[in-house]
């Protein structure tokens, strides 16, 4: 019986520590990480909107060079937005 008690003692301390400051700190860290992921998602959404705007400007462009430049900018913004979304998903 003593051996069982001695073997279970570290487990009891570990369970008791779950409600302590370490758990609260862990939850705060999780909240920060979640907020970072949300920021990345919002930045990606903004870049997608900017890409849409660039595509619309390309459609209105009167010369081919300006149109091509705006299309290129739109592609770059979309690529950046995709990378940010992927990074947010990995967090």
Image (cartoon, rainbow, N blue to C red):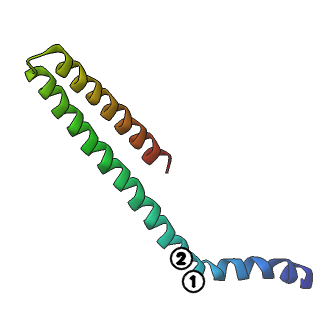
Give the SS element for disc 1: helix
Give the SS element for disc 2: helix
The number of numbered discs placed on residues in the rendered structure image is 2
Few, some or many C-alpha atoms within 10 Å of disc 2 (few <14, some 14-19, many ≥20)? few
Give me the disc on residue 50. none
For image coordinates 66% across by 77% down, the residue present is 15
For image coordinates 29% across by 50% down, the residue present is 42
Q: Which residue is mark 2?
A: 25
Give me the disc on residue 21. 1
Point out residue 84 in the picture as x, y percentages from the top left corner: 40, 43
Q: Is residue 79 above or below residue 45?
A: above
For image coordinates 31% across by 48% down, the residue present is 43
Looking at the figure, which quarter contains the N terminus? bottom right
Q: Is residue 8 above or below residue 90?
A: below
For image coordinates 46% across by 61% down, the residue present is 33
Lateral position of residue 34 relative to residue 78, left or right: right
Q: Which residue is nearer to you in this view: 65 or 73?
A: 65
Q: Quadrant of residue 7?
A: bottom right
Point out residue 38 in the picture as x, y percentages from the top left corner: 35, 55
Query: Label 2, label 1: how many angstroms apart (C-alpha)?
Result: 6 Å
Few, some or many C-alpha atoms within 10 Å of disc 1 (few <14, some 14-19, many ≥20)? few
Q: Furthest residue to the top? A: 64
Q: Which residue is nearer to you in this view: 70 or 83?
A: 70
Lateral position of residue 34 relative to residue 63, left or right: right
Lateral position of residue 4 relative to residue 19, left or right: right
Point out residue 51 in the picture as x, y percentages from the top left corner: 23, 33
Q: Which residue is nearer to you in this view: 12 or 30?
A: 30
For the residues bearing labels 2 and 1, Cβ distance under 8 angstroms: yes
């Amino acid at each position: 019986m003593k051996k069982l008690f001695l073997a279970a003692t570290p487990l009891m301390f570990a369970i008791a520590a779950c409600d302590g400051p370490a758990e609260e700190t862990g939850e705060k860290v999780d909240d920060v990480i979640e907020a970072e992921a949300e920021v990345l998602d919002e930045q990606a959404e903004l870049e997608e909107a900017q890409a849409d705007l660039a595509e619309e400007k390309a459609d209105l462009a009167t010369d081919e060079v300006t149109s091509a430049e705006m299309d290129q900018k739109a592609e770059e913004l979309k690529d950046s937005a995709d990378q940010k979304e992927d990074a947010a998903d990995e967090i």
